[in-house]
Amino acid sequence: MQQYLYLIPALPLFGFLVLSMAGKHLSRNLIAGIGAGSICASALIALILSAGFLQSPPESGAYTQILWHWFLTDHLSADISLRVDALSLVFICIITFIGALIHIYSAEFMRHDRDYARFFASMNLFVCAMLTLVMADNLVLMYLGWEGVGLCSYLLIGFWYETPGNYRAANKAFVITRIGDTAMIIGLFLLFKELGTLYIPDILTKATEHFNSGSSTITLIALLLLSGGIGKSAQLPLQTWLPDAMAGPSPVSALIHAATMVTAGVYLVARMHTLFELSPTAMHITAVIGAVTLFIAGCSAMVQTDIKRILAYSTISQIGYMFLALGVGAWSAAIFHFFTHAFFKALLFLAAGAVIEILHHEHDIFKMGGLRKKMPVIYYTFTIGAAALAALPLITAGFFSKDQILWYAWSAEGGHPLLWAIGLAGAFITALYSTRLILVVFFGEMKTTPGHLPGAAMTVPLVILAFFSIAAGWIEWPHNLLHVSIFSEHVAHALPATTLKAGLPPEIVFQLIAVGVSLFGIYSGYVLYYGESPLLMRWKQSQGLMDVRNFLFKGWKFDQLYDTLLVKPFLFITGINKADVSDKVYTAIADINLHLNKLFSVSQNGSLRWYVTGVLVGILFIITLQLLL
């Protein structure tokens, strides 16, 4: 199968090329067949590749394939070459499998959109770019996929560009992520300057020999790479673009949050783990950023009213858990949470999209309600997704992965009780707003009359994702019950094990605490939002709590803060500088041309005598010049 590696990203690329060039001339059934079929074929190849990898892992620990030499200079070379190890294989399977389900769902969801072909072409390119990112064996090719993901997010967030808010959201996402991308490319320059290569295996080998642990250079490189990951994964302080990215169609949101874009930062940090391990400062900053982000995003999700924005803030929070795990050195735990999160977050977005579609494009959860009996399949699958998000104990996949991160936040060598406490608080908040979401949307009085129910193309992917939202957690047994893990056993080939402190309380105690906190969060959500709760009524009537709610509702007012500190000063400075010397030079050139135009236009007065005279004068002038010379 190694020789067929190229087909995994090539098939989505082929789908993009066909649909972008000939999509207008194809039927909708053929468009959906090409768009979804290319991703399904990639997923099938990825699953066969995974089976072979698990049965007989390659001696080198990775499959490799060099397609062609990209460019070669005196000091820098880069190939279009692929490398698949245990880490990238996890991402490939998630990208293709969940991407295929989202494409199948989209075939019905986007059926009546006028730009059906453009949608599938952009989605195929999105998957291709993400696959290129995770399969690249050098950072130059990875950066190509990195920027391709950014481009596709821009195209899809602003897909319905006729609405001003949509293209503004696309611009916002594109500009903010460019901040992190700029830092990342500077980090790549420094890395090449120090090591003389951008091939990932060479970097991971040479880094420990070249850099001293904790040196300023390796810390700077790690922080620049971390900045790139923060931008793509919407972590503090570059998290403000993701809630607005909900302007795109629901399948786009599912793809961004579950299988592409926001997980790119997690992959980057995990892939370059050797560099981060050489910088304790960078590791600590990564953990702190993850912990703070998961808390502030969870608080904002708790008070949102738009169903998709609730899930968007939830994604920021869950990616924060992954960054927390990466920062304390719990590499496998971070990737395991990425694995389980992909299933239940794709499920939640697709189910939310179905609800929005059935309720005539209504997004406000408080205008929904009473949908439990009207749409049972969506209700049960959405509930399973929300339960996994809330980490319902011993049942859902989210419990197993989040529990690991909480344990390592305390016990790992880079862990700290404060990090654990923040993660635990985030678990309570997540359980609370997950319960709120289910109760408000599916219980109580019906406020909007549903339309037609979705067909099999939309409901079957929901059922499959619901199954994996439960079953995916069991590939990693609860670590306090049996320390045998199919997942960690293979990912350990690509990522180091976590070092634990000695002399801590048994893991079972911390697991019981996490279980209790999640159950208490679910109970709190039930008390607050089931029926006419007196506590909820007091919440609505208290001015102080309403002020806090409005503050959290606006995302802790980070947009207003950046507008005050960065945007307005920049506009003020550019306003002062709009007539500088350079501008005056260009203005003078333009003025001269305008005056010359007016001068020469006098000769164009429509008089034949004037034209003949001008011709004669010109002839005489030319003859005179020849005689003189």
Image: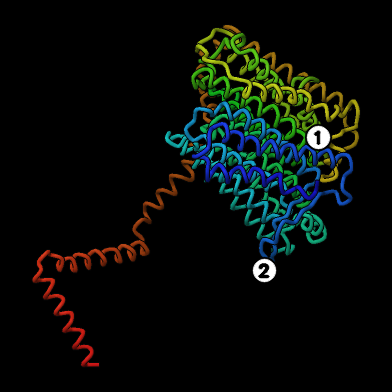
Colouring style: rainbow
Location of residue 491 in the rendering, given as x and y in whole percent from the top left corner: 82, 41
Q: How crowded is mark 1: few (under 14 residues within 10 Å), some or many (20 or more)?
A: many
Q: Where residue 432 is drawn, which disc sits there?
A: none
Which amino acid is tagged 2?
Answer: Thr
Q: Where residue 73 is drawn, which disc sits there?
A: 2
Picture quarter with the C terminus: bottom left
Say which residue appears at 62% left-offset and 11% top-offset. 372
Q: Element under label 1?
A: helix
Residue 140 in the figure: left or right of residue 359: right
Q: Compared to 159, does 273 lie above or below?
A: below
Say which residue appears at 69% left-offset and 26% top-offset. 344
Q: Where residue 408 is drawn, which disc sits there?
A: 1
Of the two numbered discs 1 and 2 on the same chain, state the one appearing first in sequence: 2
Say which residue appears at 81% left-offset and 20% top-offset. 394
Label 1 – label 2 distance at C-alpha: 45 Å
Question: Looking at the image, which is closer to me, 555 or 131?
Answer: 131
Q: Using the rendered image of the protein, determine whether residue 568 is visible from the camera's viewpoint.
A: yes
